[in-house]
Image (tube, grey):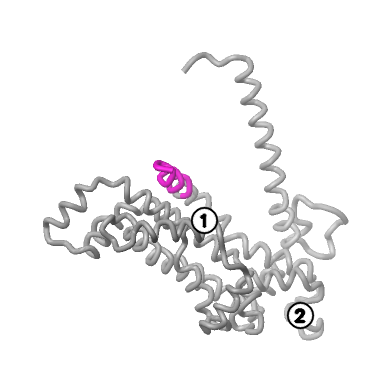
């Protein structure tokens, strides 16, 4: 590498300053929400706060004591675990099929899947289809419609095509059939890109609430945590969370705003805690998928 010029130094300093400002802007909302949720209502000042005013976890205790919140956590965890598992199972096998030139109609299927990335049926036909398939008002609506991801399929297909053909040929010579070749040879070698796709899918499943709004809004038993948060934020006087003060011994120390902040933190904390340890899989998976474009 050549010697850095004055312009390079200025450019690097400007980059650091810009990234620092962006980082502060992105981190401050989380700091404010966390501080507010841990503050004692009687000590909260007017305006923004950086640190908790007093300290109490009553809002979190009250949130977890609410049956709706606890049930929604189970639903969100369930879809976050089962959804990516089914997606990888279906998508990886479809990706492997598209790498096989002897697969019937492989050229048509490649173009067909790419076509679906640019053109969709729209919300109303999709809603009608989900209802006709009897997936609405059920837990299956969270995982079956997302069983295949074309974006993930293309990345996995690209990665499989980068593997040496001799591996598959050697397995076939040893008597392995297509399923054995895929599950015992190809799939283990695809773990880097599959890990990235699983993380993409898991984060999407955890954060999604629109499918609950569309298909399960009439069934409180299937509300996800994100949807409960959405309802809480959209309803300033949430009756299910803030019942009568007389029946609730923590009502004097918990306000609706504090509950909103606590539930917000509950929804974002899992992703915030897991992401720093797994972000390398995101980066590695995307780089792997971009090798052949």
Magenta region: 282-293
Look at 44% across and 49% down and name the residue there. 281
Nearer the observer, 242 or 282: 282
Q: Which mark is residue 274?
A: 1
Q: Which mark is residue 8?
A: none
Circle 2 residues within 10 Å: few <14, some 14–19, many ≥20: few
Look at 69% across and 54% down and name the residue there. 30
Residue 256 appears anywhere in the view? yes
Task: Give the mark nearest the N terminus, 2 or 1.
Answer: 2
Look at 77% across and 77% down and name the residue there. 238
Q: Is residue 291 magenta?
A: yes
Q: What distance separates the C-alpha of mark 2 from that of mark 1?
A: 34 Å
Q: Secondary structure at mark 1?
A: helix
Nearer the observer, 192 or 97: 97
Residue 39, position in %: x, y? 76, 61
Res. 182 image quadrant: bottom left
Q: Is residue 223 magenta?
A: no
Residue 152, position in %: x, y? 45, 56
Q: Is residue 65 above or below residue 207?
A: below
Res. 101 image quadrant: bottom left
Circle 1 residues within 10 Å: few <14, some 14–19, many ≥20: few
Look at 54% across and 60% down and name the residue there. 203
Magenta-highlighted stretch: main secondary structure?
helix
The residue wearing badge 2 is 249
Residue 161, position in %: x, y? 32, 48
Nearer the observer, 27 or 14: 14
Residue 198 appears anywhere in the view? no
């Amino acid at each position: 590498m050549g010697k850095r010029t004055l312009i390079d130094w200025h450019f690097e300093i400007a980059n650091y300053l810009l990234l620092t400002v962006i980082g502060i802007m992105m981190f401050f909302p989380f700091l404010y929400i966390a501080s507010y949720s841990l503050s004692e209502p009687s000590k909260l000042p007017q305006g923004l706060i950086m640190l908790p005013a007093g300290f109490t976890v009553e809002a979190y205790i009250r949130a977890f004591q609410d049956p709706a919140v606890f049930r929604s956590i189970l639903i969100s965890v369930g879809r976050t675990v089962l959804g990516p598992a089914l997606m990888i199972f279906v998508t990886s096998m479809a990706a492997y099929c598209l790498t096989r030139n002897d697969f019937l109609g492989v050229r048509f299927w490649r173009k067909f899947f790419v076509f679906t990335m640019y053109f969709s049926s729209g919300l109303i036909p999709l809603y009608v289809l989900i209802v006709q398939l009897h997936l609405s008002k059920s837990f299956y609506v969270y995982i079956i419609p997302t069983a295949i991801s074309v974006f993930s399929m293309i990345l996995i297909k690209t990665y499989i095509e980068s593997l040496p053909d001799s591996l598959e040929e050697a397995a076939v010579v040893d008597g392995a059939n297509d399923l054995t070749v895929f599950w015992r040879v190809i799939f283990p070698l695809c773990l880097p890109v599959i890990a990235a796709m699983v993380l993409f899918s898991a984060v999407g499943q955890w954060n999604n609430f629109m499918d609950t709004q569309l298909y399960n809004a009439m069934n409180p038993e299937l509300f996800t945590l994100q949807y409960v948060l959405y309802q809480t934020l959209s309803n300033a006087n949430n009756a299910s969370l803030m019942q009568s003060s007389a029946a609730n011994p923590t009502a004097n120390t918990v306000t609706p705003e504090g509950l909103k902040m606590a539930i917000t933190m509950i929804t974002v904390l899992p992703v915030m805690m897991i992401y720093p340890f797994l972000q390398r899989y995101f980066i590695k998976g995307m780089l792997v998928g971009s090798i052949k474009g």
